[in-house]
Image (cartoon, rainbow, N blue to C red):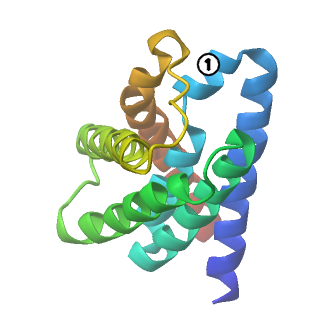
Amino acid sequence: MIRHLTRGGLAVLTAFLVFSALRQISLPLALGIDVFTVAVIVHGFFEGEIAGSIVGAVCGLVIDAFSHGLFGLSGLSKTVVGFLAGFISRKINVQLPARMAVFAGLLGAVDLGLGILLSTLVGAESLPWARGWLFIRPAGAAVLATAAVQVLRRIRSRHEG
């Protein structure tokens, strides 16, 4: 239990630090590369649907704190993505890098679609489109999540062996 909480906290903290660094470099870049979604996908993949849902909810609330919009919208979409990442990765073999890239890209698209849908339904402020950078989020999630999974696998194999 403590191990899951520690890993989840590290996932959220890492996403927060990378997002903060990207924001200092370029705000459109920080909006185009959704490191919080990557953290949720990777954590759900390794730890399962419940842990993925919890990290998704926390990451979404952190995003909502930055956006100054309606609190909880991002939390809902990230919670769903975290659940799906854990649940689907247990049912379908996404171990190969190509499959992981497709899997993460689809989850990134689900996250973007849910975010747009919830913002539209609730009538919240308009999304920060950032000159179209928002639409590269699924591709960015695919590349970064696949790379993160490969790096974490190598770290775990060296640690265990």
Asked if residue 149 is positioned above or below residue 83 in the image, the reply reads above
- Give the quadrant of residue 88: bottom left
The kind of residue tagged 1 is Leu
136 up-or-down from 6: above or below: above
* Residue 105 in the image, given as x and y percentages of width and height: 32, 38
- The residue where tag 1 is placed is 29
Residue 107 horizontal side relative to residue 143, left or right: left
| On-image quarter of the N terminus | bottom right
How far across and how far down the image is residue 153, in percent? 50, 55
Between 38 and 90, the one lying in front of the other is 38
Asked if one can make out residue 64 in the rendered structure from this viewpoint, the answer is yes
Could you tell me which secondary element the residue under label 1 belongs to?
Answer: helix
Mark 1 closeness class: few <14, some 14–19, many ≥20 residues within 10 Å? some
Where does the image place residue 25, in percent across and percent down from the top left?
77, 16
* 19 or 113: nearer the viewer: 113
Q: Nearer the viewer, residue 91 or 95?
A: 91
Q: Nearer the viewer, residue 62 or 17?
A: 62
- Is 107 placed left or right of 155 in the picture? left
Residue at image position (82%, 22%) is: 24
